Image (tube, grey):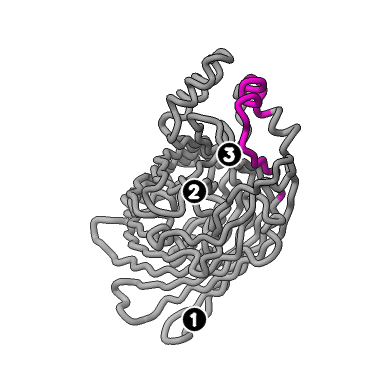
Amino acid sequence: MKRLLPLSFIALSSLLQADMAIQEFIYKDARIMGAGAANTAVGGYSSSLFYNPAGLINIKKSHGMEAELLGLSVTSSSQTQNFVNDLSDASDSEVIDVMKKYSGDAFNEDLANYSSFSYHMDSNIAYSIGILASGDINFIPHANEGTNGLLETHSRVYGGVTLGAAYELDNVLDGSVTLGVGAKYIQQKSYEVGLTESEVIQHKDDLLTYLQDTYEVDNSGFGIDLGVLYKPSFLASWHPSFGVSLMNIGTLNFTDSYGAQPMTLNFGAAIAPKISWLDSLCVSLDYVDALNAQQMRIRNYNPYYSNDQYDNADVEFDMLQHIRAGVSAGIIDNEWFLLTLNGGLYQGSYTAGFDMQVTVLKLQFATYQEQLGSQVGQLEDRRYMAQLGIGW
């Protein structure tokens, strides 16, 4: 694994099911992940169109046109590099020992870039356009080669173009209602296979090239996102808001290959009370994928290789995996310096992070724990995410 190519290697449960994290959103923003990924009723960023396009209306007018360039993010589990190094340094006879050493541990490596231009006009209109390039490495070794191989991979690299717009209607339902619409075109290459002992040993020095040459599957799709944001006039001092989003309407199922984005229905609520010693404060709560569209992957026991080694399984995820909660506290925000502290609850585990900007340099950090099984606690992966960019 000498070069970084986004791959995703996912674990199995005791029932030989290829569990994977819920993928209701195609892009993770460190600012949002640090606050529990609860953004359906919040918005405020160009990346809000991945959660609820109506949230674009909360991009601050005082910021004028926002440009986020070279928004590079890197995500990793704490022991990923150790496993990669041990596997690379192992002799053929030592590969099994490495797998036994790390068997049952989940690892992650992710590299992404989302660059965008956004503008909240003086009128009640906001819009955004972005370019996404992303991929992730999630993997788990097995102590012994079973029906799912010595090293199972569910992998993808993907990217595309996104568009979003939001329009706010005043004096509706005793408050304001914002309507949002988004569109995205995504191209994807996926790699999904249980690698055998002989494959791992023979190709451990060129494993990524081997996966590309042998198991690569191309797909592309187009999706429409719809969202609503309602800000009632009651409890005005708390600034409540309620959001609903219907995401990925279209052909982002990628013919049911790994990385498919099903249509998801999401709900959210938030309050933003004014605190004298803070620039801003927001508390939010989401329930995502209310239709239980997310599915696990199970092995297709065809004894001969095909590009369709795995199928979707109609197994629902624990309710706790649908819940997101977050707190975001803005410490300072002026034209020279911005600092926001974030915390929350994501799939039953804590999140934390910060968002900082010094003139045009942006730095964000977040930690969160991904549940890779259908049940909370079945297989957990604590991840750390750093995001660096240039913006204004």
Q: Is 207 contained in the magenta span?
A: yes
The residue that mark 2 highlights is 15
Q: Quadrant of the N terminus?
A: top right
Secondary structure under badge 1?
A: loop
Q: Which residues are magenta?
A: 187-208
Disc 3 versus disc 1: nearer the observer: 3
Q: Earlier in the sequence, mark 2 or mark 3?
A: 2
Q: Give yes or no for residue 202 being in the magenta stretch.
A: yes
- Taking depth in this image into account, of 133 and 372 the one nearest to the observer is 372
Q: Amino acid at mark 3?
A: Asn
Say which mark, if any, is on residue 214.
none
**Disc 3 versus disc 1: distance between alpha carbons?**
56 Å
Residue at (41% x, 64% y) in the render = 286
Image point 42% across, 38% down: which residue?
384
Quarter holding residue 282 = bottom left
Which amino acid, mark 1?
A: Asp
